[in-house]
Structures are given as structure tokens and as C-alpha cells.
Amino acid sequence: MERNSKLLKKLMLAMMVAMGVVISPILRIEGMCPMSSVINITCAVFFGPWYALLCAVCIGIIRMFLMGIPPLALTGAVFGAFLAGFLYRISKNTLIFAVLGEVIGTGIIGAVVSSPIMTYFWGKKGLSLMFYIPLFFTATIIGGTIAFIFLGTLSKNGMLIKIQKDLGVKVYDKSTDTDKQPIANKTQC
């Protein structure tokens, strides 16, 4: 069973990377990629922080090489992906904390890191933090809202917990447990 879980996890991760590359051009302008936030949050909730970070790095690298996207593809995504998964796990699977992690990680930290990278390494002159923070923050709010609605729907019909259990990640099932004690799968992410 654990071997199937590992294979499923790898296949789902590959599918998330592919989806992230394909849907990232939707609503995209430089510094604003809300669909990236949807993938970051979804991946963070499905897998946890480390797999979400890996997914964001893979998507960023592919987008940079195939689509000519500047390093914003990496600097804007990696902090939010990891923080979304981290806050989601420490909050015992509360969706709004995954969204909050993405907003803080990408909308603020990613924007702050992106400004000097774009100035010194990419040659974009005259762009300050006040250029990137509003764009990144707005993109994470849009993407976070979409992800929250999508994952909330999966949670309401029980599919989110089923997906997480099938992937072998730690699950806290709040809907069926009256004591609010964690129901954890043996395999943890």
C-alpha cells in the first residue's frame, strides 16, 4: 500500500507541475500570476510544504526556460508554496491558513526578494518594492480565493481527506471527530 502511495504522490506531483506550467499564462502580467497561487496552495494542501516547494521550483524553472519568464517565476512562488504548506500543517489542516501562507510568502516575502533580483541580476532599473508588492499581493488574493473555493468544495464533499489519505499525508479530519483529536495516517509528509 505504501508503495502505491509513493507512486501516486509522484504522479500527482508531476500532474501539478504540468498544470502549473499550462495554466500559469492565464491572467498573467509581469509580477502578477494568480494561477500560480492556485497551484501553490492546492499542492501545499495535498502534499505539505516540502512537496509544494519542489513543485514551485519545478514550475518556475520550466516557465523560465520554455516561456522566457524572468526569475520572478521562482522568487515569487517558492516562499508562498512552502509557507502555505507549513501554516496549513501547523494549523491542523485549516484552509484559510494555507491561503494566508501564500499571501505572506508570495505577496510580501516573494515581492521583497524579487525587487533586488530583478534590479541587479535582470537589469530592470527604476522598479522599487512598491512596484512588486501590490502586484504580488493582488495576485495571491485572487489565486488564494480561487484555491480556497476549490479546496473548500473538495473538503465539503469529503474528497480532500480522501486525496490526502491516498497520498499518504497527515490528515486531521475535523468533520468526523468530536474530540478534535487528530486522525493521522501512518505515513507522514
Image: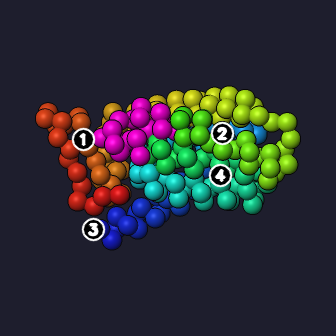
Find numbered disc 1 in the image and state the secondary structure of the residue it sits on. Answer: loop
Q: Which residue is mark 4?
A: 74
Q: Is residue 44 left or right of residue 24?
A: left
Q: Label 4 neighbourhood size at 10 Å, few (<14), some (14-19), many (20+)?
A: many
- Residue 27 in view, yes or no: no
Expressed as whole percent of the image width and height from the top left, the position of residue 76 reads: 64, 45
Q: Which residue is mark 3?
A: 1
Examine the image and state in which quarter residue 2 appears.
bottom left
Quote the CA–CA distance across marks 1 and 4: 33 Å
State which mark lies toward you, 1 or 4.
Answer: 4
Which residue is pictured at 66% across the width and 44% down the height?
113
Which residue is pictured at 53% across the width and 35% down the height?
104
Q: Label 1 neighbourhood size at 10 Å, few (<14), some (14-19), many (20+)?
A: some
Q: Label 3 neighbourhood size at 10 Å, few (<14), some (14-19), many (20+)?
A: few
Quote the CA–CA distance across marks 3 and 2: 43 Å
Find numbered disc 3 in the image and state the secondary structure of the residue it sits on. Answer: loop
- Most frequent secondary structure within the magenta stretch: helix
Colour treatment of the image: rainbow
Find numbered disc 2 in the image and state the secondary structure of the residue it sits on. Answer: helix
Q: Earlier in the sequence, mark 1 or mark 4?
A: 4
Q: Earlier in the sequence, mark 3 or mark 2?
A: 3
Q: Which residue is mark 1?
A: 173
> Against 50, is 158 above or below?
above
Q: Where, quadrant-wise, is the N terminus in this rendering?
A: bottom left
Find numbered disc 4 in the image and state the secondary structure of the residue it sits on. Answer: helix
Q: Amino acid at mark 2?
A: Val
Q: Amino acid at mark 1?
A: Asp
> Against 128, is 159 above or below?
below
